Amino acid sequence: MSDQLTQEQIDAMLNGGTDDASEAESPTDKLSQDVKDIIGEVGNISMSQAATTLSQLLNREVKITTPKVRGLTISEIVSASEVPKVVTKIDFKQGLVGSNILMIKMEDANVIADLMMGNDGKDVSDKPFTELELSAVSEAMNQMIGSASTAMATMFSRRVDISPPDVKEWHNPDEAAIDMPNQDELVATIAFNMSVDGLIDSEIMQVLPLDTAMEIADIMVGDEAEVVYGREGVHVQLAEEPEAQAAEPAVEKKAEEQPAVSADTVSVQKPKFQDLTPNNDKHAPRNLDLIMDVPLDFSVVLGKSRKTIKDILSLSTGSVVELDKMTDEPLEIYVNGKLIAEGEVVVINESFGIRITNILSKEQRVRHLNKD
């Protein structure tokens, strides 16, 4: 038997003996390590917040591991994805460009839906994934991505708004598709291992388009660096700092040109402040005409009721929900979400209307809020 090392053994030694060498040297992974570090840190913080939200929804402990960031194409992600899967996509409406995609196994989604409906999340492998389960998972994914977006807004010091989630099911490879124009487009994938109280222990993946990933990296590095995308891939280019020695003579010259101030030329005076006496002129203009055309939302509340997620998901056509308002009680009238009056229902030319019976004072509104 020859003692000569094979090329595979040499490559393994050069790569530290790990099995991740092929992944690290993937020809399609054009995200440099500095970009991966930035995207990974943002993903770690935002998804940690999302895991906290999921933990509160399920009333179970949720843990995620340190993320693994890679640059892949859409076609590579789809071909490597195991089905069935639940894929949630949101678009950024403000604060960021692009979208955010969350991918999770359908078996894990079934566990999440079962827990949200008040069950124990066990023995759901053979349970069908119906519209009811899809609605529950959609709400969970919506709140998770919403929490992640809120965390990013805090990090970026800007408002981040998202669109309602678009949730799709991949039952077979033919249905596996991500809605993007170019399937060979490079995107950033952030993979976590998520565990839920012994019921779930699998990978959950976040997918960011390249434009979104580049904008996030650009925001995080600020004015000190620039995110560059070229033939060699995406990387962060640090800005050149001016040499300290070149700045010193300019400071000395400025100090030499500064004229000396003689103590004899300094005069001290009492400060003069603007008169703050209240203006009691009763004829001062009110300028109310400037806001007369501002639109306000006018709404009438028939009644309210508090339900659990399980109760809401069990609603169907013909369900009856009991409200907290008696039939002879006045209805509440709100303007821009503020309670201002009470009234009663009337019919005007086959349309509903409201007759105002009482304009509430400030004390009455306070008592109403305290009662709620």
Image: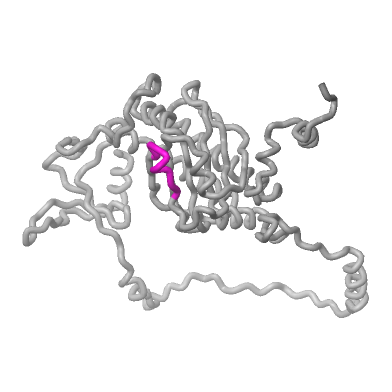
Q: 196 or 232: nearer the eye?
A: 232
Q: 13 or 314: nearer the eye?
A: 13
Return the x and y of residue 146 as percentages of the image width and height: 46, 45
Among the 4 quarters of the image, the one containing residue 288:
bottom left
Looking at the rendered image, the quarter that the N terminus falls into is top right
Return the x and y of residue 243 as percentages of the image width and height: 87, 64
Identified at 79% across, 74% down, the residue is: 268
Looking at the rendered image, the quarter that the C terminus falls into is top left
Residue projecting furthest to the front: 1
Q: In this rendering, is residue 310 above or below 298?
A: above
Q: 274 or 156: nearer the eye?
A: 156
Among the 4 quarters of the image, the one containing residue 20:
top right
Identified at 33% across, 25% down, the residue is: 127
Return the x and y of residue 347 as percentages of the image width and height: 8, 56
Q: In this rendering, is residue 27 above or below 97?
A: above
Residue 8 belongs to magenta span: no
Among the 4 quarters of the image, the one containing residue 261:
bottom right
Q: 214 or 9: nearer the eye?
A: 9
**Residue 84 in sight here:** yes
Number of marks in picture: 0
Give the extent of the magenta segment: 170-178
Left or right relative to 173: residue 9: right
Residue projecting furthest to the left: 349
Q: How is the image coloured?
A: one colour
